[in-house]
Amino acid sequence: MTHAHGQRAHLALADGTAFEGALFGAPTVAVGEAVFTTAMMGYEEILTDPSFTGQLVVMTTPEIGNYGIAGDDAESLDGRPQVAGFVTRSLSPIASSHRAREPLGEWLARHGVAAITEIDTRKLTRHLRDHGSQNAAFGAAPVDELVARARAAPDMAGLDLVARVSPKARTSFAEGRGAWVPAGAKVRPAERHVVVVDYGSKKNILRCLVDAGCRLTVVPARTTAKEILDLSPDGVFLSNGPGDPAAVTYAVETVKGLLGKKPIFGICLGHQLLALALGAKTYKLKFGHRGANQPVKDLATGRVEITTQNHGFCVDVASLPKGVIPTYVHLNDGTSEGIAVPDARAFSVQFHPEAAAGPHDSLALFDQFARAMAAS
């Protein structure tokens, strides 16, 4: 049973497949790449993750909006939603949480983000899984018009979306996780200066770095290697972000200029950019990995970790040059989930060890980065 009573509308994929639903959020037509996430919680974190820029996010969990929007759970630095549109099966009529500041629909409308509910998200997800992620459009327009708009939208391959979400100026960041620190975890005083190259960073990554003993200077994506090194960092962090890593050529050049100079840690897009800087290649996955329940294997220990992931592109393991060690693989499809370059004091992972939302299996990677800086 669904609860939305918005204007009737359609969602149309570029291949002509259409679904009927009801609008909520902002009353506009939304266009972007349709992707699905298997996360069972954390829709506020998903909506505010800059890595979802340009995408229509389909929730596989049916009931959405039941705990409203808290505000404190936002992952974008400005707290605003980052998605191009939001797709759900059932919109909860109430927000039953003491933390909720406003209902999901009102929050999306206030920020100009369109959403659609009463969509058969199981059927839509199976279609995207079988035929691949593709552009789509939804709104109260004729299906033919929506299909045309989806087909006219730029393809995600070759698209540099980092420019949309990277900050315009250098800032500092000193906020830790506070009450969200997992039981038994240590919070260290700020002993190391880390320059974060922000391609669209999630806030909880920065909080985890702070808790690992890092004093952070956050810089725009187009900051050069010389400008970064002139800040005298103990280490450099390469953040997550949206779009095709191969299109962010300026970032690849910057990483090339940093290799071997300072310890480097990269997550998600940062992992892909590190691989490209080392001479490897990236490619687009059929439907990507998005969710808080993705299994990876640590190749050194054999340990399996359940991780949060959000990416549509992947590092080609076969293209990794000599001296680059694969460290993690995805257990569903065997794709690259991590690399290490001992000679350059650099390592990276495709998954999100900070989670938010998700499991804490991989939090120790932040301490690994801190140890690498202490040893250098």
Image (spheres, helix red, strand yellow):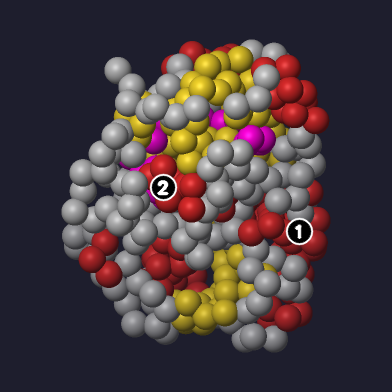
Residue visible at 21% across and 44% down in the picture = 96
State the quadrant of the N terminus: top left
Residue visible at 70% across and 51% down in the picture = 161
Query: In the shown orientation, is residue 127 left or right of residue 162?
Result: left
**Where residue 113 sits: x, y (%)?**
54, 45
Q: How crowded is mark 2: few (under 14 residues within 10 Å), some or many (20 or more)?
A: some
Does residue 61 lie above or below 309 as drawn? above
Residue visible at 80% across and 61% down in the picture = 250
Answer whether residue 165 is visible to the viewer in this image. yes
> Mark 1 or mark 2: which comes first in sequence?
2
Q: Range of the magenta residues?
A: 29-45
Task: State the SS at label 2.
Answer: helix
Residue labelled with disc 1 = 252
Amino acid type at mark 2: Glu
Residue labelled with disc 2 = 106
Which sits in the foreground, 60 or 92? 92
Task: State the SS at label 1.
Answer: helix
Q: How far apart are marks 1 and 2 (CA)?
A: 40 Å
**Where residue 168 sits: x, y (%)?**
68, 72
| Magenta region includes residue 39 | yes
Amino acid type at mark 1: Val
Answer whether residue 195 is visible to the viewer in this image. no
State the quadrant of the C terminus: bottom right
